[in-house]
């Protein structure tokens, strides 16, 4: 027998997250006939439906930005939020049998789901932008560093939110029934198919409380040089994302033992 090698805590954590990521990918895409094609098909179908609807109305969303690109920059981040919101509530129940292993905790299940959804969001956004550019639908790129900052903050926001919802979904199973009631209004209030500067200013103080609106506005500003998200606020997004991450970690830390023991 060769010499035994001991692994660090971080190496064990990395292997656990990787194994859960593979499991989540097989669970989500393995039983679908189109498999991994759904990564692109879901946002593409949203774009086709909304783009067709507004093309019949003869409406241009923003000067200098094709309608499908404007839609994509709003739909892709919102779908990431929507999937994180829904799937985090079921993270404990769907992985309960795995918690018998000492190395695995609900924290790992939530992290793997958020990382998968975030990877799907980035891959679908980049791939669809590339496909649209290939067929001649493109806009001048603007600010790569802004996109990195926005997406890092968005990842923190989604992870903190998912940790809190993981606890809520495990302790109050009926909370899952309220998820659609929250997500549907946010779809219309988060700037998916409008720009904040197109909304009368008296409504800005109410809409601006929504961090998702700032994510989408700043994403468009980072992607398109002709887009001026003058009402988007990166410091507010940073504050709300770090506050949500801190809140989620505190909630999880206070309840994680109950999550493992609960039946």
Image (cartoon, rainbow, N blue to C red):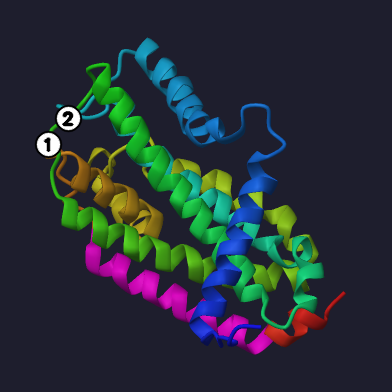
Q: CA distance from mark 2 to mark 1?
A: 8 Å
Circle 2 residues within 10 Å: few <14, some 14–19, many ≥20: some
Q: Which residue is at a point 64% across and 89% down the rendered structure image?
A: 254
Tag shown at residue 226: 1
Q: Is residue 60 visible?
A: no
Location of mark 2 (residue): 139
Drawn side of residue 231 relative to residue 18, left or right: left
Task: Name which quarter of the figure residue 212 lies in.
Answer: bottom left
Q: Secondary structure at mark 1?
A: loop
Q: Secondary structure at mark 2?
A: loop
Q: Which residue is at a point 73% across and 62% down the rendered structure image?
A: 175
Q: Is residue 118 visible?
A: yes
- In this view of the protein, which residue sits in the foreground, 181 or 70? 70
Instruction: Say which label, 2 or 1, has the lower sequence index.
Output: 2
Circle 1 residues within 10 Å: few <14, some 14–19, many ≥20: some
Quadrant (top left/top right/bottom left/bottom right) for the C terminus: bottom right
Q: Is residue 225 above or below residue 174?
A: above
Q: Which residue is at a point 29% across and 41% down the rendered structure image?
A: 199
> How far across and how far down the image is residue 184, in percent?
57, 44
| Residue that lies at the very extreme toward the right in this rendered image | 263
Residue 116 colored in magenta in the image: no
Q: Which is in the foreground here, disc 2 or disc 1?
A: 2
Tag shown at residue 68: none
Residue 249 colored in magenta in the image: yes
> Which region shows up in magenta?
233-255
Quadrant (top left/top right/bottom left/bottom right) for the N terminus: bottom right
Task: Name which quarter of the figure residue 70 lies in.
Answer: top left
């Amino acid at each position: 027998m060769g010499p035994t090698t001991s692994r660090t805590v971080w190496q064990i954590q990395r292997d656990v997250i990787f194994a859960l990521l593979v499991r989540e990918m097989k669970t989500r895409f393995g039983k679908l006939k189109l498999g991994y094609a759904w990564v692109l098909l879901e946002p593409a179908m949203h774009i086709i439906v909304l783009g067709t609807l507004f093309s019949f109305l003869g409406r241009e969303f923003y000067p200098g930005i094709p309608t499908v690109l404007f839609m994509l920059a709003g739909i892709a981040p919102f779908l990431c939020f929507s999937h994180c919101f829904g799937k985090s509530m079921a993270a404990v129940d769907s992985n309960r049998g795995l918690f018998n292993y000492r190395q695995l905790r609900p924290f790992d299940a939530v992290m793997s789901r958020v990382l998968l959804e975030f990877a799907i969001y980035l891959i679908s956004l980049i791939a669809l932008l590339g496909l649209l550019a290939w067929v001649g639908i493109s806009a001048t790129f603007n600010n790569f560093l802004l996109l990195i900052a926005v997406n890092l903050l968005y990842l923190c926001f989604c992870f903190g939110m998912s940790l809190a919802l993981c606890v809520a979904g495990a302790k109050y199973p009926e909370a899952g029934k309220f998820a659609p009631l929250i997500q549907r209004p946010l779809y219309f209030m988060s700037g998916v198919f409008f720009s904040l500067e197109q909304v009368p200013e008296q409504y800005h103080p109410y809409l601006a409380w929504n961090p998702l609106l700032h994510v989408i506005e700043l994403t468009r500003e980072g992607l398109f040089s002709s887009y001026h998200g003058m009402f988007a606020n990166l410091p507010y997004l940073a504050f709300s994302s770090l506050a949500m991450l801190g809140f989620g970690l505190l909630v999880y830390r206070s309840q994680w033992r109950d999550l493992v023991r609960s039946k």
